[in-house]
Amino acid sequence: MDTFLTKVFEMKPLVFQLVLLVFSSVVLAGEKVLRIIPRNDEDVEFLSSLQDDQDFDLDFWKAPHRPGLAVDVQVNEDAYKNIAVKLKEKSLEFQIIIMDVKKLMDEQNLVESTRGIASDFYSKYHPLNEIVRELYNLQNQNPVMTEVFSVGKSYEGREQLAIKLRGKESPNKKTFFMNCGIHAREWVSPATCMYVIKQIVSKYGKDESVTNLLDKMDFIIMPVLNVDGYVFSWSGPRNRMWRKTRKPNYGTSCIGTDPNRNWGHKWGAPGASRNPCRDDYRGSRPFSEVEVRNVASFLSLLSRQRQIAGYMDIHAYSQLWMTPWGYTKYPTRDHNELMRVSKAAVTAIRQAGYGTYYKYGPSSVIIYKNSGGSKDYTYGVLKIKYSFALELRDRGKYGFLLPANQIIPTAQEAFQGIKAMAKEMRL
């Protein structure tokens, strides 16, 4: 293998790229995603131990947290044979939910007409540079109601761009902040943010529900928070499932921190790893990641100026509408109000035309405990009552490889939920 790679690096750039593409395809051949349901704490402990076992080379799409909660794990061909034996020894059953990861990757951006919707920018996945170009296109086409701006630069020097969408001016009007793409591999998240932006821009003043939305509060939407990680996830098939940031970690070869375990509220509590090689690594300290610091500083400024009405962090996958707390099951002081608004939102999603079911509630209750998350910070530190996090489609059939023909249905129903949420918010 070393000889092979030496020869590859000596090749001309075009040939080098082609060889790497073929090599990545060979490496990914035969990779599957397994679903395992741990029955008890012993099963959870066993599956957790596999996360740190370098011999298996496993990629956990859904990590083990508690009995009864599905664990989804990507395995290569060799690891599959070994892990199947290990699971059998533990009498743990599993099912293959994705038979061929590489095939789904190859097909992910193929677009077919969905309910008569023509294929356009918003029905495909796009790399960061194309998302940035479209943001500026929207601003240029609608300069009065839109403003693209940066909250700061990432570790690798990329701008973290957001767009402000302004409706009718009114005294003490507040703003709702929404970010997508905090986890790099969740491509349907930025695609959904871009769809929501387009709908607001194109339908304001024409559609009553959109007009009411933007007249009630302005929106600031950041399509990709984790810009470095997102770019890396587009750099080749082997990197497609990258989740974290891209800053190196001192004392280890493992790179990156989970930007949704790095916020400065209950950082380091249960639900985040101290192992820098794990996908849910919390970082060396709260706000160790500049991308998280930039967004937190901007939100803090809005909070001090009493300008912020709500916050939302959009993820994939699992179909969940989540509220604080993540770090504890103890209810927030606004629990009943958050449940009322969440119920209205998931009902709107269910009635959007696809019958999609979203579960709602505190993330610590409906999935698992998770600490250092953005919604806990915005609620607990910035006192933003209406703080939510979403997990978009699906429930595991495609997982992070949701086909492009599901982007618009996913975004459509999510937007219905967002409009219903905004209508129910008591400002």
Image (spheres, rainbow, N blue to C red):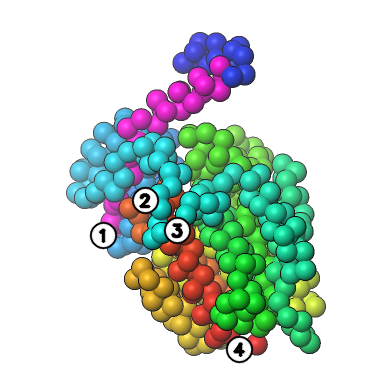
Which residue is identified by label 1? 39
The mark that comes first in sequence, 1 or 2, is 1
Residue at which label 3 appears: 117
Three-letter amino acid code of the residue under disc 1:
Arg
Q: Is residue 112 left or right of residue 155?
A: left
- The local secondary structure at tag 1 comes to loop
Label 3 neighbourhood size at 10 Å, few (<14), some (14-19), many (20+)?
few
Q: Where is residue 314 in the image (x, y as percent from the top left)?
A: 54, 63
Q: Which residue is at the front of the view, 252 or 118? A: 118
Q: Which of marks 3 and 4 is in front?
A: 3
Q: Name the residue under label 4.
A: 426
Q: Which circle's residue, 1 or 3, is located before the other in the chain?
A: 1
Image spot of residue 196 (x, y percent): 57, 65
Mark whose residue sits in front, 4 or 1: 4
Name the kind of residue labelled 3 in the image: Ile
Residue 175 visible here: no
Q: Nearer the viewer, residue 89 or 68?
A: 68
Is 170 placed left or right of 90 in the picture?
Answer: right
Residue at image location 50% in from the left, 49% down from the top:
124
Check if residue 29 falls in the magenta segment.
yes
Q: Mark 2 points at which residue?
A: 398
For marks 4 and 1 on the same chain, the one whose residue lies earlier in the sequence = 1
